[in-house]
Image (spheres, rainbow, N blue to C red):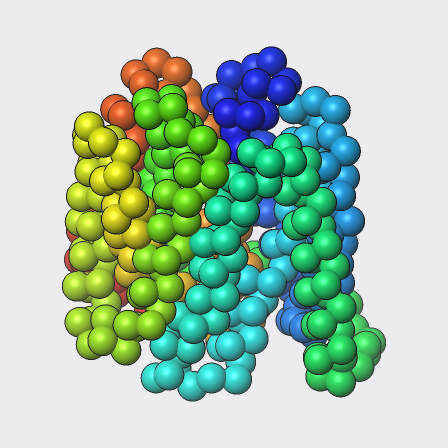
Amino acid sequence: MLPQLASDFATSVSAASVIVTSFAVAYACAVLLQGPLGDRYGKLRVVTIGVALAGLASFGCAAAWSIGSLAGMRFLMAIFASAPVALGMAYVGDVIPLEERQETIARFIAGSIFGQTLGPLFGGVLTDSAGWRSSFVVLGFLFIAGAAILFVRTRREWPALGPGRFEPLAVHARLLARPPVRWLLAVGVAETFFFFGGYVFLGAYLRERFDLSYTVVGLVLAGYGVGGLAYSSLVRFFVRLGDRRLVVLGGVLGLVFFSAIVLANQWGYAVPSTFGLGLAFYLMHNTIQTKASEVAPDARGSAIALYASAWAIGQASGVAALGVAVAYIGYASAILAAAVGFMLLGFWLRYNMARLHA
């Protein structure tokens, strides 16, 4: 919906992308608190409360009167919406043995991928038919419904609130003293800086070059989620390739499919290419986040929260950097530069995977 927001608020697409950056920055900050909160008060409790408050913040986004106010509400929304994925992965780490964890995390992430698949599609349809505000209203109701279901289904598993001090800074300081954790954070920043720095602008690129409707753009971008779901369904096969082959394959495919989208003369090539991008990203990302679930078993929620924070920082800085690059060198060159960076990261990981071992 970036082009529509830019039009409604009389600004550029690059300037409107601040709503993506604000969400990612808030996500990166909030998850640092939510990881220790989950370890201290119960992961399922923190997720349920966060999802409910994210729904209320989404209603606030629908009422925004400027790009600045929308960015502010997205910032608030991200504070609460950052809980489910990081704490969900930590919960999987708590209850699933390591040898089964990569497959289980892939299935868990399939739910998130399914949302990413439906998000661009319904976002495009709603933006075309009822305006961008309707997307946030619908999203708010979905968050509230999700929180209600979580409460009913998990309330009995919430641990009792006991005595003891809550010291998130001390927990993070202890984790950051470990070299594998620091390497994990660096990789988390890099993977999303390059991938989402380029991916976020694909919709605006397709809209500008081929004059597609928002519904069609949403359908095209939904291919990313389908590719991610394909990875989830085939994860047992991919795991046999080994971690080093997976990260290289992900990086190479990322460059191939980003290039296919921006160099093709017809928008139809973008449909299979976004599918390929979803597959490429999760080949690398799921491999890394499995490492994140075991890098600090004594404080798993906090360690994964640090990784999720790095992931969000990478996305925020990548979108900001690519926004500047788009203004100076255009969509195609900026997106291709990000794709090359993503590929190089895959090759670096190929020879440095041992740095992520606890």
Q: Position of residue 77 (x, y in %)?
A: 69, 45
Identified at 23% across, 40% down, the residue is 269
Regarding residue 94, the answer to whether it shows in the image is yes
Regarding residue 325, the answer to whether it shows in the image is no
Quarter of the image that includes the C terminus: bottom left
Q: Nearer the viewer, residue 355 or 97?
A: 97
Q: Position of residue 185 (x, y in %)?
A: 42, 52
Identified at 74% across, 30% down, the residue is 64
Looking at the image, residue 142 lies above or below residue 295: above
Q: Position of residue 189 (x, y in %)?
A: 41, 46
Q: Residue at the far front: name it.
A: 129
Number of on-image labels: 0
Judge from the rendering whether residue 247 lies leftward or rightward of residue 287; answer left or right. left
Looking at the image, residue 214 lies above or below residue 325: below
Judge from the rendering whether residue 294 lies leftward or rightward of residue 10; answer left or right. left
Looking at the image, residue 146 lies above or below residue 221: below
Identified at 22% across, 44% down, the residue is 257
Where residue 156 sits, quadrant-wise, is bottom right
Where residue 26 sits, quadrant-wise, is top right
Q: Nearer the viewer, residue 148 or 335?
A: 148
Judge from the rendering whether residue 352 lies leftward or rightward of residue 39; answer left or right. left
Q: Position of residue 288 (x, y in %)?
A: 35, 62
Identified at 45% across, 54% down, the residue is 117
Judge from the rendering whether residue 191 lies leftward or rightward of residue 19; answer left or right. left
